[in-house]
Image (cartoon, coloured by chain):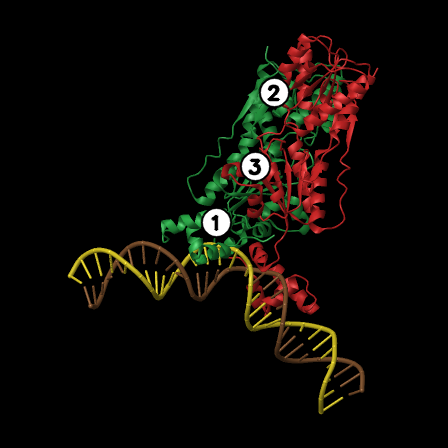
Chain colours: A red, B green, C yellow, D brown
Amino acid sequence: MVRTTIRDVARQAGVSITTVSKALNDYSDVNPETRKRIKELAEKMNYVPNAAGRTMGGKADKVIGLLINDLKPTDPSGAVYGILSGVCHACQDNGIEFILLTSDILRQQQETLKVLCLKKQLTGLICSGFRISDRYMDQLADIDIPCAFIDMRTPDSRVLDITIDNQRAAFDAVSYLLRCGRKNIAMVNGSTVADVSLLRESGYRAAMAAAGLEVSPLRVVNANFDDIVAYNLVWRLLQDDPGIDALFCASDLMAIGACRAIEDLGKRVGSDIFVVGFDDIPIAKYLYGGLTTVRQDFYRMGYVAGQAIYDRIEGTSKAHTDDVMYELVVRGSARAG
Amino acid sequence: MVRTTIRDVARQAGVSITTVSKALNDYSDVNPETRKRIKELAEKMNYVPNAAGRTMGGKADKVIGLLINDLKPTDPSGAVYGILSGVCHACQDNGIEFILLTSDILRQQQETLKVLCLKKQLTGLICSGFRISDRYMDQLADIDIPCAFIDMRTPDSRVLDITIDNQRAAFDAVSYLLRCGRKNIAMVNGSTVADVSLLRESGYRAAMAAAGLEVSPLRVVNANFDDIVAYNLVWRLLQDDPGIDALFCASDLMAIGACRAIEDLGKRVGSDIFVVGFDDIPIAKYLYGGLTTVRQDFYRMGYVAGQAIYDRIEGTSKAHTDDVMYELVVRGSARAG
DNA sequence: ACCACATCCGAAAGCGTTTTCCAAGCGAGA
DNA sequence: TCTCGCTTGGAAAACGCTTTCGGATGTGGT
């Protein structure tokens, strides 16, 4: 395959490569007619500027990298997909390059974040799926490009944190259960190293405290965001503690496992036991008369992250990153009176 | 930010850039000790070869692009995500670059596939989500890099088609319904321009024919792979045609909509009406006593596609692309006896 | 007729690599 | 001692593009 170069176009047009470059890049010091002629010719010749050449010439195009920690074969909640497509579309809308990265590369080669950024020539970085225990947090200071984390607060003040107000959302959800008349609310949490888990649990506790209720340590379990684990834990929990009349789950997936356990124990979701999930995954509305849940818009989170990083790169006015809203969606699994 | 270049390393090491380049690329004509010294120094200096520079120098790294047609904000079936992560991992495992592309770029700039490949300097291309009506099919002949399509047969014999045997899978699924004693089986298909729909319908008809049953044209509806549309169509279908005792759906999502319609009409899924879906999406096991369905492994499809394209690029022995298997998963929504 | 100035275009440098080719140094064999 | 060949390292070209700077030409004002 022979690539058409700028030289070919120049030769064909009978001008210098300088002129072709200027014409194609809309410089002012080239005759409008010449420009038109060259543009048409380039088009006809199927000329595509060599990206590497441009970069070398000093016109590198900007790239936002989305770094996903531990990309798994499936994505039951759709969170990763939503974020990914959001970032992707934000990049497209702003005419900036997008590239997907996974932490496997880091792990394999024992690389630092900084080296990764250099290697991929990143102009901006968005990270998702990390936990507060991850060692990459120490490396954030070295990074000198705009950077955002999704769903995790970071120690470095220069990095953007894109997330809903998880604490408040959990507070609202649990408050709703309380308003439904439920008092014995247990929580099925995710993991102790996920920042969102910490925040949601904190919101849960705050709501209970506000209602003057105490929370037994046994009534908070960690199911690692897994439906099967949640099933097992809830199955035992409900037998050990028959007084429980509601469950607040830190993800829909775990809520599904929980609901199954509830039914397998001969109780009814939505009457005997109220269940509230988190995320509003696509099939939440089909389960158990509909799963009451806290809706998060992952696509929007990704989009906002992409837009915000783009704005930082360009130094333009900030996108407001705090409008990533949540919403309590009430369905059959927990409905007031 | 000042990037460390090969020149910096050379200066620091007191050798020429040639020697550094050779040392780092493991050329034989450099003293082992010198090589070691340079490598350590480069490491210490955080030197990362400039990709554009390498490309210009003639050592471009290979890139496989995954082109997704019409990337949507959500991916309820998880198919796109599975394929994506599969390709991504295959690329990682083979040490080849991976890049995600969407057709929006094509549409926006009215570009051809070839131009896209040139622009991104692709060495290999994998396409997903396309339909037989898409105009890009005409452009396949121009592409001179290894190319694969997922879930769509292409006219060009040089491109790989990665897909399960949809016709056979549908045949098996419908045969199973027949073995369950069901005779009035309707089909909820996807779209007439999706290749998989055509194949699945063909399998459905073949199975019915093999059982000596005729298929009324009214008993095949197209719900565009959408759960809501499926709901509406099935809701009407079952009223117009009360004899129907089973439904074969071309996707789980549509099956879910269908099931809902069935229950809303006061009938029971799995007894009054058997339902078989397609895909085995993550929550299929939770619905209606479990959805009987044809399992596809999208991750594996992606991985196989990536591996196959890599093999073509390298000219090495072919990966066997025909082992992308399916499996009928029997659950409550359609169980024999 | 002359100068100032604007318009249009090209020569050449430079970006960071790889790679080809040549030279220097050295030991061994004649 | 001379030559041959091997080992090690460097000079320089090449890749495709952008950008700076200067040169050529034309135009208007004096």
- Same subunit, labels 2 and 3: the answer reads no
Left or right: where B138 falls relative to B223: left
Left or right: where B20 falls relative to B74: left
Q: Please state the chain letter of the residue tagged with numbered disc 1 in the rendered image.
A: B
Of B72 and B253, nearer the camera is B72
- Please determine whether, in this image, residue B73 is positioned above or below residue B109: above
Q: Earlier in the sequence, mark 1 or mark 2?
A: 1
Q: Give the amino acid type for the residue marked by disc 3 in the picture.
A: Ser
Q: Give the amino acid type for the residue marked by disc 2 in the picture.
A: Leu
Residue B323 appears at what percent x and percent y?
48, 30
Report which residue position mark 2 lands on.
B213
Q: Give the amino acid type for the residue marked by disc 1 in the picture.
A: Ala
| Residue drawn at the location 50% of the way across and 43% of the way down | B96
Residue B332 appears at what percent x and percent y?
63, 15
Report which residue position mark 1 lands on.
B42
Report which residue position mark 3 lands on.
A103
- The answer to whether residue A170 shows anywhere in this view is yes
- Same subunit, labels 1 and 2: the answer reads yes
Residue A112 appears at what percent x and percent y?
55, 41
* Tag 1 secondary structure: helix
Left or right: where B171 falls relative to A284: left
- Same subunit, labels 1 and 3: the answer reads no
- Please determine whether, in this image, residue B252 is positioned above or below residue A302: above
Q: Are marks 1 and 2 in contact (CB under 8 Å)?
A: no
- The answer to whether residue B332 shows anywhere in this view is no
* Tag 2 secondary structure: loop
Residue A161 appears at what percent x and percent y?
70, 37
